[in-house]
Image (cartoon, grey):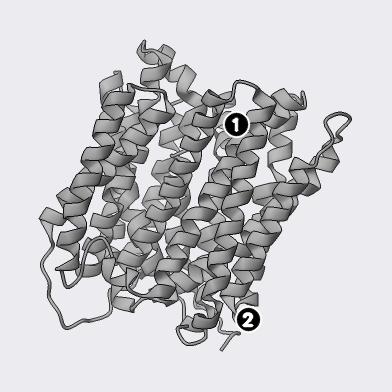
Amino acid sequence: MSNIVFSIRKYAAITAILMVLIMTVLDGTVVNVALPVLAVEFGVSDSYTVWVVTAYQLVITMLLLPLSSAGDLYSYRKTFLTGVTIFTCASILCAASQGFAMIIISRIIQGVGAACVMGVNIALTRLIYPKEVLGRGLALNAMVIAIATAAGPTIAGAILSVASWHWLFLINVPFGIIAFTLGKKLLPDNLPKKDKSRYDWVSGIENMIVFGLIFYSLGSFARQGNIAVNICLLLTGAAIGVLYIRRQKKRPNPMLPVDLFGIRLYSLSIITSMCSFVAQNVAMITLPFLFLSGRGFSEITTGFLMTPWPLATMIISPLAARFVERHNPGVTAAAGMSVYAIGIVLILLLPSTGTSVWNIVWRMAVCGIGFGLFQTPNNIVMVMATPIKRTGGAGGMQSTARLTGQTLGATVVTMIFAVIPNLLQSIDACLYIALTMAVIAGLFSLSRAPRINNKT
């Protein structure tokens, strides 16, 4: 029934999940603003300070699938609560850091906690929401991630304007305690299952090495690190990745969900998701350069111009969730990517001079509407295409696809800016890439439409 009224207990359980999800996503962005402050505080160079961000993101990427697998085998609830505990305690350690080494170690520990939460939040959402309104829960997840990602710098700036950098981490503590208390009492346990597989530690180690080497080398490429070293790391990661995939094909419940890739609907959804996040991140990184340097707007105005995108996504996501309860989500997601592509084209068609703020605002809103219309239906297809006992692995792969797309997007922008010296030309090149990836994502999404009615 579409008009199911959730009990207060279920709303509280959902609140616990979303609260921690906001914290973990925000901590990937808020620290960016404080990097110059931390460089002075710990007496290190700006390039070294970037490790405060990189260490956190790298650990999450390396551990998402291993911890999702742990949730599948043992308990999503226990994995989530463990993550909340680790993340909250590590936040205290970050705030208490007296040296650069300590804050890096603390951020690594914090990344472990964040990976626990991100790896099972989709699985817990699926257990809490009835199937007929699951889209609304996934829409909330998508909306929270979009808003937290976009709002991170603004929130960080607000905190730093009234308090020291320590509060960027300490603010997590009360929310972590509340989320743990609610989660311990209210989150559901896994559905009972017959097989009692043991955790595959070898696969876990292989996964960490593969994703660690590949993502580190991509990030180093973006930072213009040693090319020879980066190529060696990338090739080593790829070689171990081949062995890792071969091992996964022999496992009954593989950590890297190669069994789910056999479900064409799921594999198409993963590719679609990755392409969409490349398209999103390329544009989100490029547009501030367009507004600041290309159009001569101030920093404050640029921040205002970036706001309509996440705001439109926030408004559209829950509406899209209700819409796909009665309409084909593959077609809806394809329409969303089409709207997003139109938004990018409209930005590319901006006049070179005399551009008003409001002329940009509505174009940014079109991009946000398109992405909001795409993301929720795509997530619904990904989740519903998989067996419920494999929801942890499916959710972990979903988050991995998002992080992979975002990382590739950032790498592409950095490389284009390095290759094309003219700023306006490099901005146009990046936006054309964003447009191309949006079209590809839309076509993949549309190709799923005939299969969805039989799968969801």
**Mark 1 crowdedness (10 Å alpha carbons): few <14, some 14-19, many ≥20:** few
Q: Position of residue 79 (x, y in %)?
A: 26, 59
Do the CB atoms of the residues marked 1 and 2 lie less than 8 Å apart? no
Q: Quadrant of residue 10?
A: bottom left
The amino acid on which the numbered mark 1 sits, given as a three-letter code, is Ala
* Measured Cα–Cα span from mark 1 to mark 2: 41 Å
- Secondary structure at badge 1 equals helix
The amino acid on which the numbered mark 2 sits, given as a three-letter code, is His
The residue that appears at 58% across and 71% down in the rendered structure is: 446
* In front of the other: 162 or 422: 422
- Secondary structure at badge 2 equals loop
**Mark 2 crowdedness (10 Å alpha carbons): few <14, some 14-19, many ≥20:** few
Q: Position of residue 441 (x, y in %)?
A: 55, 60
Q: Is residue 379 above or below residue 147?
A: below
Q: Position of residue 3 (x, y in %)?
A: 60, 85
- Residue pointed to by mark 2: 327
Q: Nearer the viewer, mark 1 or mark 2?
A: 2
